[in-house]
DNA sequence: TTGCATATTGTTCCTTGGGACAGTCACACA
DNA sequence: TGTGTGACTGTCCCAAGGAACAATATGCAA
């Protein structure tokens, strides 16, 4: 089992043919006749796999589906595979983060190469995403006050300043600060800042 | 003066025509008959502007020139403008960071829109790049020892640990640490970590 | 009403960070 | 040989972070 390929195409004979080729290469395959069919199935984001997507399909178009998936936070790589490639559509798709854009008919070599790249890429980002997810989860457990303290800590404020800004005492800030490093499960201020930076919580100007 | 557009195309009549159109729109224009001509001129990276680039040109091709410029650290936005757009070339160009990929003939509206987007994008990244450049400059003034201390500081190590790892005393580390915050011109550990993170100096795993 | 979470604050003690002041040693360069 | 720089180290002292032990007040849910 090397991964699950989601094939979205309205042409049933094409779906059947591509499914056969992909299964021969060792992949699992799920086929969908429309974008909505895939949305309804809401494929697992974290499992190895990718989406093979036609551009022109009845109902929601390929790029439309791409937009939806992005909105939903999906990170399944998308490979477009279409018989009608025009430059603006290609550009938009790639800019929106599509893994590749291929034209029918496609050689097995090209297709499998693209899929392999997609898998590698997905793999590389999965771990990273997992860590960020963990951070966000921990962050969500902070109370409002703790979160305020967190924000000021990672901006380099010292307890005295934080206490002043929040209209409380240094002692109280210490208590919250303790809770923050506890809940975020870090061992140093440096880790906390690093996390905040990765989550885009620090202004690019900042200092 | 809204910006300087570098037009690279082997077709002189095209260069002349596009130059006229761009100047009408208020842009400055520099034209080049080949990729090497542009490389020789080595256009200013920080000035507002972008590159209008044909794909098929004698000698170094458009995508080849793009690669070269990327290697050289150029950040001038590149807009491809070609009469022969094929999907693989389009995909590669956009993936490599091209701002847009247009086909000849191009309407003034499309072209000027693309240029405007390129300028906005360049503007947004220029400030960010400037800051990073400043950081790198400061970083370069650190001595070897200071740099070692820097690396350990931003990983959350405390002076005692740093001293142990470097086989020196806590007092010495303090001295280097002082130099580091001095030379990097920051006011807190948080800032230091933030900078290190932005410069990609912290492992994505790290902790 | 009772129990829990949250926010708050205090005292004491220890560790860590950081400034001030001072000094040694090695090495490269004029 | 004198000068400068970088690395190294020491003492004294103060500021800041953090743990331990303790306590009060509020509001919400079982």
Image: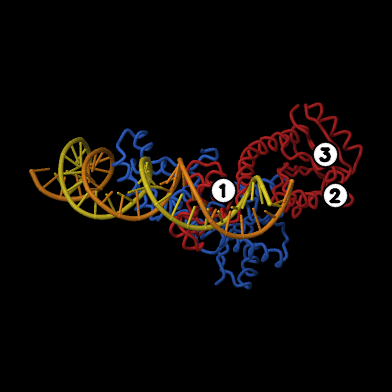
Chain colours: A red, B blue, C yellow, D orange
Residue B54: name its quadrant: bottom right
* Residue lying at 65% horizontally and 50% vertically, measured from the top left: B56
Evaluate whether label 1 is on the same chain as label 2.
yes
Evaluate whether label 3 is on the same chain as label 2.
yes
* Residue lying at 80% horizontally and 30% vertically, measured from the top left: A28
Looking at the image, tell me whether mark 3 or mark 1 is earlier in sequence order: 3
Q: Is residue A119 above or below residue A135?
A: above
How many numbered marks does the figure carry? Answer: 3
Chain where mark 2 sits: A
Name the mark on residue A198. 1
Q: Please tell me whether mark 2 sits on a helix, a strand or a loop.
A: loop
Q: Residue A178, image x and y in percent?
A: 50, 47
Dot 1 crowding, Cα within 10 Å, few <14, some 14–19, many 20+: some
Q: Nearer the viewer, mark 1 or mark 2?
A: 1
Q: Is residue A75 left or right of residue A161?
A: right
User: Could you say which is closer to the camera, residue B19 or residue A62?
Assistant: A62
Q: Is residue B43 left or right of residue A100?
A: left
Looking at the image, tell me whether mark 3 or mark 2 is earlier in sequence order: 3
């Amino acid at each position: 089992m090397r991964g699950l390929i989601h094939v979205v195409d309205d042409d049933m004979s094409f779906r059947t043919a591509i499914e056969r080729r992909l299964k021969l290469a060792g992949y699992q395959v799920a086929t969908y006749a429309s974008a909505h069919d895939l949305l309804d199935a809401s494929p697992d984001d974290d499992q190895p796999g990718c989406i093979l997507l036609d551009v022109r399909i009845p109902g929601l178009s390929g790029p439309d589906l791409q937009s939806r998936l992005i909105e939903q936070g999906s990170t399944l790589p998308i490979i477009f595979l279409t018989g009608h490639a025009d430059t603006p559509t290609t550009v938009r798709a790639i800019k929106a983060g599509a893994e590749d854009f291929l034209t029918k008919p496609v050689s097995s070599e090209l297709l499998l190469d693209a899929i392999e790249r997609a898998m590698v890429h997905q793999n590389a980002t999965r771990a990273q995403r997992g860590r960020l997810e963990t951070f966000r989860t921990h962050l969500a457990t902070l109370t409002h006050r703790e979160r305020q303290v967190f924000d000021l800590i990672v901006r380099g404020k010292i307890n005295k300043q934080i206490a002043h800004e929040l209209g409380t005492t240094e002692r109280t800030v210490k208590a919250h600060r303790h809770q923050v490093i506890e809940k975020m499960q870090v061992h140093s201020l440096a880790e906390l800042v690093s996390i905040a930076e990765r989550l885009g919580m620090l202004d690019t100007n900042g200092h």
